[in-house]
Image (cartoon, grey):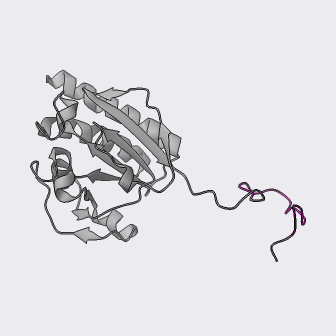
């Protein structure tokens, strides 16, 4: 791929991450999981042709959005490290994440995670997260690292390089039954329904 193509990847990633952050109302300090196959980005089959250049371009796009918004990026490793994740020690401590011992490399962890591990300030590897939102570039399957109720978000750009893009936000579980209320009202309803809960 040409330098111009990698610059376009950076711009596209920044655009869709900003769209995702807006849809999720992502505030500073929230977790955004990033799953990436750099092989798929350059048009190859996942796990066959990882590239640091594509990883660097993607990282730059995520970082440009992060600087403005303040979320914690969390980069998913490949299955050879059991899909552990790279993040900062600050994020790991804030969310009491379980640290594990390994250093991602392109052949065990993937090019994206390996690159992020070397770029993030005080990077650590953690076993799992429950992120507030996620972006998957190349169908790496990030669902295991999202909070339980995930809602798809359709990006305006459907491919990054040659890789398909999938995004999701999460929301709290809606609990209760027919009488449950999900928005705070000015007045508390009196009794109502078929009995009370006292």
Left-right relation of 82 to 142? left
Q: Is residue 105 left or right of residue 141?
A: left
Rendered image quadrant of residue 49: top left
Quadrant hosting residue 104: bottom left
Q: Residue at x 26, y 57 (%)?
A: 85
Left or right of residue 68, residue 81 in this image? left
Q: Is residue 132 at least partly visible in the picture?
A: yes
Instruction: Report the front residue among 152 and 194.
Output: 194
132 w.r.t. 10: above or below: below
Residues rendered magenta in the picture: 181-195
Say if 23 sits above or below 75 in the image.
above
**Closest to the observer: 22 or 121?**
22
Is 184 colored magenta in this rendering?
yes
Q: Position of residue 94 (x, y in %)?
A: 39, 68
In the rendering, at what x and y percent does residue 177 appear?
A: 72, 59
Is residue 119 something that shows in the picture? Answer: no
């Amino acid at each position: 791929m040409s330098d111009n193509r990698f610059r376009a990847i950076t711009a596209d990633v920044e655009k869709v991450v900003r769209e995702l952050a807006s849809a999720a109302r992502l505030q500073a300090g929230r977790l955004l999981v990033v799953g990436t196959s750099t092989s798929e980005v350059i048009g190859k089959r996942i796990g066959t042709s990882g590239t640091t250049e594509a990883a660097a371009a993607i990282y730059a796009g995520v970082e440009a959005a992060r600087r403005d918004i303040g979320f914690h990026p969390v980069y998913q490793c490949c299955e050879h490290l059991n899909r552990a994740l790279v993040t900062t020690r600050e994020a790991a401590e804030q969310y009491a994440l379980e640290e594990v011992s390994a250093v991602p490399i392109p052949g065990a962890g993937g090019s994206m995670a390996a690159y992020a591990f070397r770029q993030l300030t005080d990077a650590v590897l953690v076993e799992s997260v429950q992120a507030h939102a996620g972006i998957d570039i190349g169908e790496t399957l990030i669902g295991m690292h999202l909070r339980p109720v995930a809602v798809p978000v359709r990006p305006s750009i459907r491919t990054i390089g040659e890789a398909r893009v999938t995004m999701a936000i999460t929301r709290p579980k809606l609990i209760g039954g027919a009488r449950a209320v999900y928005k705070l009202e000015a007045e508390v309803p009196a009794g109502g329904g078929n009995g009370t809960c006292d």
